[in-house]
Amino acid sequence: MREASTATAETTAALETFIETATDALASLGANETTLSEVEAAGDDLVKTVTTQQDRLEELETRVDTLESELKTERETRAKEAAEDRKRLSDLEACVDDDTETADSQPDVETPSDASTLGVEPPQTPLEDVMRVPEHLVEESLTANQQRARFIAKDAHEYTQQVPAGRAIKSSALRRVLAAGEDATIYTETVSRVIDFLDELGQEAVKIRESQQGERVVVFTDAFVKRVVAYQNHRQRNTVVTEGGVTG
């Protein structure tokens, strides 16, 4: 781009020289003043046009330089965030494993909310691991957008609509759900990041599609939603048993 700008400047200088030479030549051949004036005017217009294009080109070069710098910064930021997310997720998975081992080491208590009875399956995606993180660890372990992704996934059956591929929610609907849940304005970039987390953590259980209107759509598989519902029911029944005691 810089080479193009230099070439344009050289072209302008060459045009000015050519017009001056042509005018002198016409004058030496006895051209009248009207002809000379017309040639000079046409030459001036051409030089102005080239100069304007040169100015515009320089503006575009500056804009490209700015965009390249912003893109580089954005890539570096995303790479850093991705590394932090992977570490945070790894820590969370380790935490969940520790909690599971602790729970397994406790004496068995016979309750009507036995997981096998309710058909609760082990987590099959990182998103399900995140969903099962204890509430007291959520804020310190997850970023704001990861918490939002968890919020959507936990009740995916309530916020989505049935489609042939599973259960889907459009980005506009996802924004409304988040706004209602937080009682705050949710921006487009936030929605985009939440969808990215759902896609990344959901792996094969989550697909991102695009509607005919160009809107992003999150699609959860039926199997994923079934596991979520089973786990949520199991968790709620365990809470009731814990708070009310086992009756027999």
Image (tube, rainbow, N blue to C red):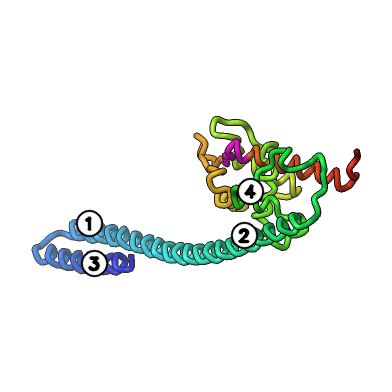
- Residue that numbered label 4 is attached to: 123
Q: Total number of numbered labels?
A: 4
Disc 2: CA contacts within 10 A as few (<14), some (14-19) or many (>=20): many
* Residue type marked 3: Glu
Going from the N terminus, do you reach mark 1 or mark 3 first? 3
| Image quadrant containing the N terminus | bottom left
* Residue type marked 1: Glu
Mark 2 and mark 4: Cα distance apart in space: 14 Å
- Residue that numbered label 2 is attached to: 89
Q: Which residues are magenta?
A: 218-224
* Residue type marked 4: Pro
Indicate the secondary structure of the residue bearing disc 4.
loop
- Residue that numbered label 3 is attached to: 16
Indicate the secondary structure of the residue bearing disc 2.
helix
Residue 77 image position (x, y, % from top left): 54, 65
Disc 4: CA contacts within 10 A as few (<14), some (14-19) or many (>=20): some
Mark 2 and mark 3: Cα distance apart in space: 66 Å
- Position of 242 with respect to 230 (left or right) is right
Mark 2 or mark 4, whichever is nearer to me = 4
Q: Quadrant of residue 89?
A: bottom right
In this rendered view, identify the residue nearer to me: 191 or 141: 141
Going from the N terminus, do you reach mark 4 or mark 3 first? 3
Going from the N terminus, do you reach mark 2 or mark 1 first? 1
Mark 1 and mark 4: Cα distance apart in space: 82 Å
